[in-house]
Image: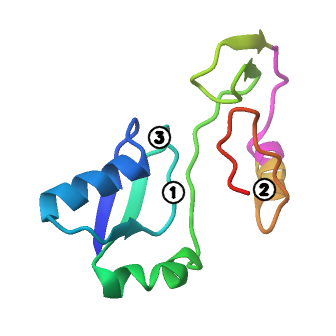
């Protein structure tokens, strides 16, 4: 198993492909896709025994850190799209923001953006 600090701009698949080439091993996978716009720890599994454990790694708790820019809307719902609206935002206290953040804690039903690659 390799713990790789995936930089922004690379897909998880690209990281796995590089590991496959560098290690000269065909059986390489990962335990959770990171968006190309995201950076962070990617668990890369090398070899048959490790890749068989993928499900157990996928079930582990995860933690995310995010930087957001309030009031901007884009065609892709992320920083890569064309900005379509630059709304004025109200003044928020830290307590206001913490209250809103709690809406995203736990099991939620999320609607993927139109540009998302949805696996059905």
Rendered position, 105 above or below 37: below
In the rendering, which numbered label is found on residue 33?
A: 1
Rendered position, 96 above or below 50: above
Magenta span covers which residues?
87-97
Q: Residues within 10 Å of mark 1 (few under 14, many from 20)?
A: few
Check if residue 66 falls in the magenta segment: no
Circle 1 sits in a helix, a strand or a loop, which is it? loop
Q: Earlier in the sequence, mark 3 or mark 2?
A: 3
Q: CA distance from mark 2 to mark 1?
A: 19 Å
Q: Residue 51, how many percent across, how many down?
A: 39, 79
Q: Can residue 44 be seen by looking at this rendering?
A: no
Circle 3 sits in a helix, a strand or a loop, which is it? loop
The scheme the figure's colours follow is rainbow
- The residue identified by callout 3 is 36
Q: Residues within 10 Å of mark 2 (few under 14, many from 20)?
A: few
- Which residue is rendered at x = 76% and y = 33% of the image? 114
Find out whether the residues at labels 2 and 1 contact each other: C-beta distance under 8 Å.
Answer: no
Taken as a whole, is the magenta stretch helix, strand or loop?
loop
* Relative side of 42 to 120, left or right: left
- The residue identified by callout 2 is 104
């Amino acid at each position: 198993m390799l713990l790789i600090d995936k930089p922004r701009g690379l897909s998880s698949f690209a990281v796995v492909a590089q590991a496959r080439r560098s290690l000269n091993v065909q059986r390489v996978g990962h335990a959770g896709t990171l968006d190309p716009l995201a950076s962070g720890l990617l668990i890369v599994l090398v070899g048959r025994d490790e890749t068989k454990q993928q499900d157990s790694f996928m079930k582990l708790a995860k933690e995310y850190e995010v930087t957001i820019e309030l009031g901007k809307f884009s065609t892709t719902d992320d920083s890569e799209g064309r900005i379509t609206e630059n709304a004025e935002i109200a003044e928020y206290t830290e307590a206001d923001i913490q209250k809103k953040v709690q809406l995203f804690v736990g099991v939620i039903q999320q609607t993927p953006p139109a540009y998302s690659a949805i696996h059905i």
